[in-house]
Image (spheres, helix red, strand yellow):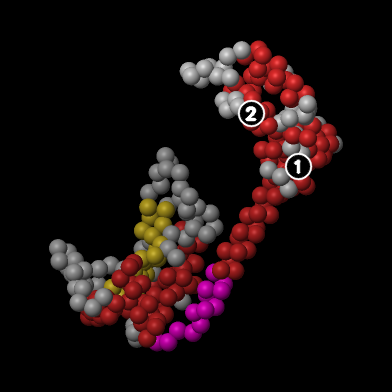
Amino acid sequence: MTHSSGKYADFEGLRERALALRRAGLSLRQIRDELQVHNKETLQRLVDGEPPPEWTKRPRAKDDLRKRARELRQQGWTYNQIQAELGCSKSSVSLWVRDLPHPEPKRTPEEQRERMNAGLAQLMASREQKREATKQEAAAAIGALSDRELFLAGVALYWAEGTKDKPHVRRECVEFVNSDPGMIRVFLAWLDLLGVNRDRLHCRVMIHESADVAAAEHYWSNLTAIDESAFGKTILKKHNPQTVRKNTGDTYRGCLGIKVRQGADLYRRIEGAWYGIVDAACPGDLRNRT
């Protein structure tokens, strides 16, 4: 039947036998075994042009899905809608219906844009609602502060945002500058806890000259319960017309600086308390001391 080199002799005669077997209803595997032809390429050439018998054809489970997908596409459904309806992959939908014309849009570009913007607004509102819920839950978990807790919070707050003494610049003074009203309120409550009277405080506003300076001064005066007349001269930052500022509008009130008069001893207590916190959190680690 074969030469030692592996080449098949009398190919045409072999093909006639293969075609006869194929027409008799044999599968490729059966023809292979009958003719002892184990080379897949040669076997395929032997039956080339002769359709396989029906019984060898595998049923195509997706034929019904393909038919339905084409029907839906012709009704104007989108790929996403067809995918959701039939539960198949989007790539399969594309393969089945890509030869069909695109359905006419059901909405004008303006309507589609409006619908998209409405969906985006709804998504953003949902996200914002989750954000606020998380913040409110965290705020509620704090509860009331003990004097010790407020003291520790105030020390950490000052050491993060307040003026600090350095070996190269001796500044043993208590001065705190911030634009966050909440930070200012906590700092003032902390000073109250320490027995620092308001008449020891020197306050002044720092703000861009292009802002509403008078409104800012009035705002900080109300927040601190200190009369505007007791405030120091407001520091105005020159406006650069080439700079695009984002801290504008009614909510921009600049920063408030608060300095405690005769505060050297208080500063030393703050620094000592801070390193007490460091020692408690990281025993033996004194590397950051000034």
Identify the residue shown where x is 55% and y is 19%: 2
* Residue 102 visible: no
* Residue located farthest toward the front when viewing the structure as drawn: 1
> Which residue matches tag 2?
32
Identify the residue shown where x is 78% and y is 24%: 23
* Mark 1 residue type: Ala
Q: Is residue 138 magenta?
A: yes
Name the one closer to the observer, 21 or 249: 21
* Mark 2 residue type: Arg
Provide residue 254's location: percent of width, then percent of height: 43, 59
| Quarter of the N terminus within the rendering | top right
* Residue 134 visible: yes
> Which residue matches tag 1?
61
| Quarter of the C terminus within the rendering | bottom left
Q: Is residue 170 magenta?
A: no
User: Judging from the image, what secondary structure is the residue with disc 1 in?
Assistant: loop
15 vs 233: above or below: above
Tell me the mark number nearer the camera, choosing from 2 and 1: 2
Q: What secondary structure do most residues of the magenta stretch adopt? A: helix
Provide residue 92's location: percent of width, then percent of height: 69, 38
Would residue 264 appear left or right of 224 to someone viewing this image? left
Identify the residue shown where x is 20% and y is 77%: 284
39 vs 74: above or below: above
Numbered disc total: 2
- Find the magenta span and give its range: 135-147
